[in-house]
Amino acid sequence: MKTTKRAIVLILMTSLCAGAGQLFLKYATSQPSIINVYFAEWFFLYLVAIILMTLSFREGELSVLYPSLAISYVWVILVSPIFITTETLTFFKILGSILIFIGVSLIGIGARK
């Protein structure tokens, strides 16, 4: 089975939801109560991510799509310093993000051959 472009778009949307969900989970854990609006938002985004991932897996190779979820780490590294003031963007975080992106790209390129 070849991986469709729709499957790739869906898995990238999944990674965005997962990355945003991590930000909301971080906010949720900084609140005094365990159940709060940020926790609900995290839960909702992860539910959406699961649905998108399921739809994506129907149209592509697991060995290509699942590693693509690592892009969610890149989103978190790049966006968290903007929304969470205690987070910093360092050289090694940027380098790690670049390596993740290269690795995911190589998997995608290898799947076309």
Image (tube, grey):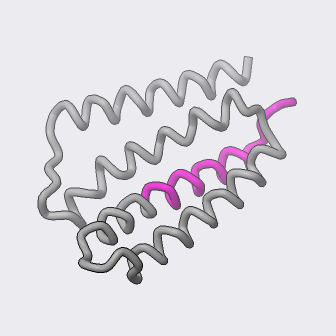
Figure quadrant of residue 20: bottom left
Give the side of residue 46 with respect to residue 1, left or right: left
The answer to which image quadrant residue 39 occupies is bottom left
The percent position of residue 80, horizontal first and vertical second, equals 27, 57
Give the residue furthest to the bottom: 37
- Residue at the front extreme, as displayed: 33
Where residue 15 appears, as percent x and y from the top left, is 53, 51
Left or right, 70 with respect to 54, comes to left
Identity of the residue drawn at 54% across and 67% down: 45
Q: Is 4 placed above or below 37 here?
A: above
Residue at left 77%, top 54%? 55
What secondary structure is the stretch in magenta mostly built from? helix
Q: Residue at x 53, y 69 (%)?
A: 43
Q: Nearer the viewer, residue 108 or 61?
A: 61
Front-most of 34 and 6?
Answer: 34
Residue 48 percent location from the top left of the image: 63, 66
Asked if residue 81 lies in the magenta stretch, the reply is: no
In the drawing, does residue 41 fall left or right of residue 9?
Answer: left
In the rendered image, which quarter contains the N terminus? top right
Position of residue 2 relative to residue 57, above or below, is: above
Residue 27 higher or lower than 77, as above or below? below
Residue 106 point in image, percent of width and height:
55, 22
Residue interval drawn in magenta: 1-19
Is 4 one of the magenta-colored residues?
A: yes
Nearer to me, 78 or 34:
34
Identify which residue is drawn at 29% across, 50% down.
78
